[in-house]
Amino acid sequence: MFKDLDPILHSQLRLAVMSLLISVKEAEFTFIKEKTNSTAGNLSVQIQKLKDAGYIDVIKQFRDNYPLTVCKITKDGVRAFEEYVGNLQSYLGKG
Amino acid sequence: MTQPEKKLTEKESLDLIAMMINKAKDSYHDTGIGAMMWGTVVAICSLVKLAELHFDFRLPFDIYWLTILAIVPQIFITIREKKERKVKTYDDIYMDYLWLAFGISIFLMIFITNSIFRVWEPVAIEYSQLAGHSSGFSFREFIAPLFLLLYGIPTFVTGTACKFKPMVLGGLLCWICCIITIYTTIKIDLLLTAFSAVFAWLIPGIIMERDYRNAKKGLAAANV
C-alpha cells in the first residue's frame, strides 16, 4: 500500500529548497533564490510554508546594516524529507 | 505574487532532488588567498634561512617571526571569506577545524622542538668538550621532517575532501620530502621545505583563486 506523498514537500519550489538545505548546514535567502531561479516573492511565501510546517528554521539578522535571512533545516524537516524520498522510491520501484 | 505550484511526477521529484543536491555541492569556492599567502610565507622563511646558512650572515631578527605576523592578515582573510559565504556546508566546518588543529599543532611542534633543543644543546657541547669531537648527532637536522609531516596532513585531507588534485599531490609531496629530509643536510631540508610550501599551498592557492574569479564572473554573467 502506497503512502500519500507529503503535500508540503510535493511542490517544485519547496522541494528544491528542502533539497538544497538537506545538503548544507545553513544557507542565505539570496543563495536559495539564486540556486532555485525563483523570484523573491514566491520564495518568501514557500519558505514561510516550510517554516509553518516546522521543516525549516528562518533566522532574520543584520549584516552591515542590511537585513539577512538565513534558513536551516530542522530535525522534523530531515525526517519528513527522508520519508518523502522513501515514499518516492517505493512508488517508482512498484510503478 | 506567488506563481502557481507545479505538480511533479515521482521521477521529476527525484531528479529535482538530485539536481539541487549537486547545486549545493558546487556552491563553495575557496578564494585561495590564504593558501597563497602561507605558501609564500613558508617558502620565504625557508629560503631566507637557507641564504643565512649558505652565505653566512644573520638577519637582526628570526625570519620565522614572519609566520606569527602572517596570522594577522589570515584573521582578516577568514573574516572576509566568512562574510562572503552565502552558504555554510558541513565540509566547510570540518575544514575550518582541520586547519585550526593544524595551526595549533604547528605551534605545539615549535614549542616541543625548542624545548628539546634547549635540553640537547648543553649536552652536545659538554660531550664535544669531553670527547674532543662532536657527537655527530644534530637535532636541527631532524626538525624539517617533523614539520613536513604536519604540512602534509591538512593539505592531503583538504585535497581529497574537496576533490582538488593539486592539493592531494601537494600533500603527498610534503610526505615524500618528509622522508627525504631525514637523510639530507639542513640546507637541503630548507630547500625542500620551500619546494613543498610552493607545491602544497602557493600553486594550489593560485589555481583556487583563478577558479574563484571564474565562478564569480560566471555568476555575474548569469545575473545580467
Image: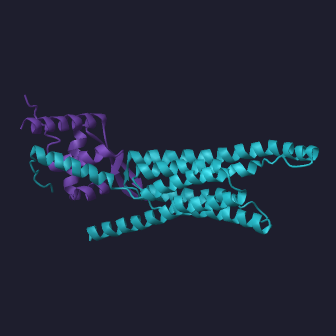
Chain colours: A purple, B cyan
| Number of numbered callouts drawn | 0
Residue at the spot 50% in from the left edge and 45% down from the top edge: B97
Q: Is A54 displayed left or right of B81 in the figure?
A: left
Residue at the spot 27% in from the left edge and 59% down from the top edge: A34
Q: Is B194 displayed left or right of B116 in the figure?
A: left
Of B100 and B201, the residue lying toward us: B201
Q: Is A92 displayed left or right of B100 in the figure?
A: left
Q: Is B30 displayed left or right of B220 in the figure?
A: right
| Residue B112 screen position, x and y as percent | 70, 43
Of B82 and A50, the residue lying toward us: B82
For the view shown, which residue lies furthest in the top direction? A1
> Where B51 falls versus B82 (above or below)?
below
The quarter of the picture where residue B207 lies is: bottom left
Residue at the spot 77% in from the left edge and 49% down from the top edge: B138
Residue at the spot 80% in from the left edge and 45% down from the top edge: B118
- Location of the C terminus of chain A (image quadrant): top left
| Residue A43 screen position, x and y as percent | 22, 53
> Where A93 falls versus B23 (above or below)?
above
> Where A25 falls versus B66 (above or below)?
above
The quarter of the picture where residue B42 lies is: bottom right
Of A39 and B69, the residue lying toward us: B69
| Residue B183 screen position, x and y as percent | 67, 52
- Location of the N terminus of chain A (image quadrant): top left
| Residue A89 screen position, x and y as percent | 15, 37
